[in-house]
Image (spheres, coloured by chain):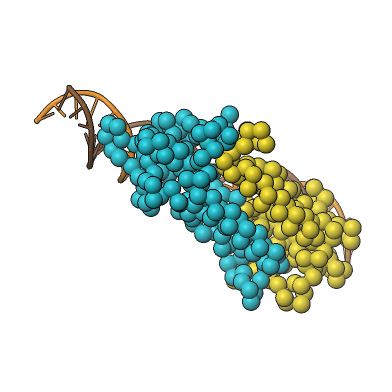
Chain colours: A cyan, B yellow, C brown, D orange
Amino acid sequence: MVSKTCEYAIRAMIFIAQKSKNGSITGINEIADKIGSPKYFIAKVLQDLVRKELVQSLKGPTGGFYIAKEQLGCSLADIVKAVDGNKLFSGCGLGLKTCSETKPCPIHNKFIIIRKEIYNMLQEAKIGEVSKNLEKNLTFLRRK
Amino acid sequence: MVSKTCEYAIRAMIFIAQKSKNGSITGINEIADKIGSPKYFIAKVLQDLVRKELVQSLKGPTGGFYIAKEQLGCSLADIVKAVDGNKLFSGCGLGLKTCSETKPCPIHNKFIIIRKEIYNMLQEAKIGEVSKNLEKNLTFLRRK
DNA sequence: TTTATAAGAGATAAACAACTCTTTTATTCC
DNA sequence: GGAATAAAAGAGTTGTTTATCTCTTATAAA
């Protein structure tokens, strides 16, 4: 569905969002620990998301990552786009470069419906909302 | 969504199905050419699908691949399972091993709905049906 | 029964995704 | 200003997926 990198990115963003709503900032060690990801790897991924302005960072002691109020409206679709590109939302189900309305692959018409639903679901899931149930221990982010 | 290998597999199976309905058998050279895939690679993939009995093969001159009448009811979901396993149909959207009803990830409830729809779509798409429009040039299988 | 043909099998190579480590830069606090 | 801290940046490694080549085995037709 999405790359492993993207899974880490979403999990990290949800965790950071939950922290940020408390007004607190969190570092790479805590993030890696709480979402169960390789530390140096998620660091790279977040570096990229900072450049793309989905998350903020601060260097130095008391530094770390946080999400500003305005950014809590960021959707999971935005994260997927930033990490994996648009393939999931606009690519052909059978990997054809030329697949389109006028030259469809055999599953084109069924596939565009599913694709749209995936997009809607991810677009409606805002990082601020999704992180709500985390605090109440209603949802989880770690592998084991 | 599915692996590149799986995309090739589905395209090949649809092409073979269309040929088989004419009563003709097709070889690896024609398949690779018509679906636009690396020849040796799709050969390996089909080898595997023969072992898993989704398609038939015959060695020697006049040999090749074909799909028996009974196998035309094989669905795209069957092919995906054979090539990629069950990950698409039963895996967590955020890659968590422990994600479940009782310990859900933050998008679990939204995700299982989508997953089910993807499964239904692929399960309903039978290889015999899907290949129908190919002959009429209403759908296509090549990249360019 | 010999020859030609096509799939099967095994081994290898290239490309890409995932992951790790080290050095540099920015910031805070003393 | 100097020490400590944390992210940024760059380089390098590992592992998996995708792709290629060669040799073997089965079969059909001459």
Out of C16 and B130, give the one closest to the viewer. Answer: B130
- A45 relative to A25, above or below: below
Q: Is residue A38 above or below residue B139?
A: above
Q: Is residue B6 left or right of residue B68?
A: left
Foreground pick, D23 / B18: B18
Q: Where is residue A47, by image quadrant? A: top left
| Foreground of the two, B27 or B124 | B124
| Residue A93, position as x, y percentages in the image | 64, 60
Residue drawn at the location 70% of the way across and 64% of the way down: A110
* Residue A126 appears in the rendering: yes
Can you give x and y, in whole percent of width and height, for residue B16 in the image?
Answer: 78, 64
Instruction: Where is residue A11? Give x, y as percent.
Output: 50, 40
> Looking at this view, is D12 or A133 the one in front?
A133
Residue A126 horizontal/vertical position (percent): 50, 49
Picture residue at 64% right of the left edge, 53% below the top: B2
Q: Is residue D27 left or right of residue B133?
A: right
**Residue found 28% across the figure and 38% down from its top:** A59
Q: Quadrant of the C terminus of chain B?
A: bottom right
Residue A43 showing in the rendered view? no
Q: Quadrant of residue D5?
A: top left
Q: Residue at x 42, y 39 (%)?
A: A21
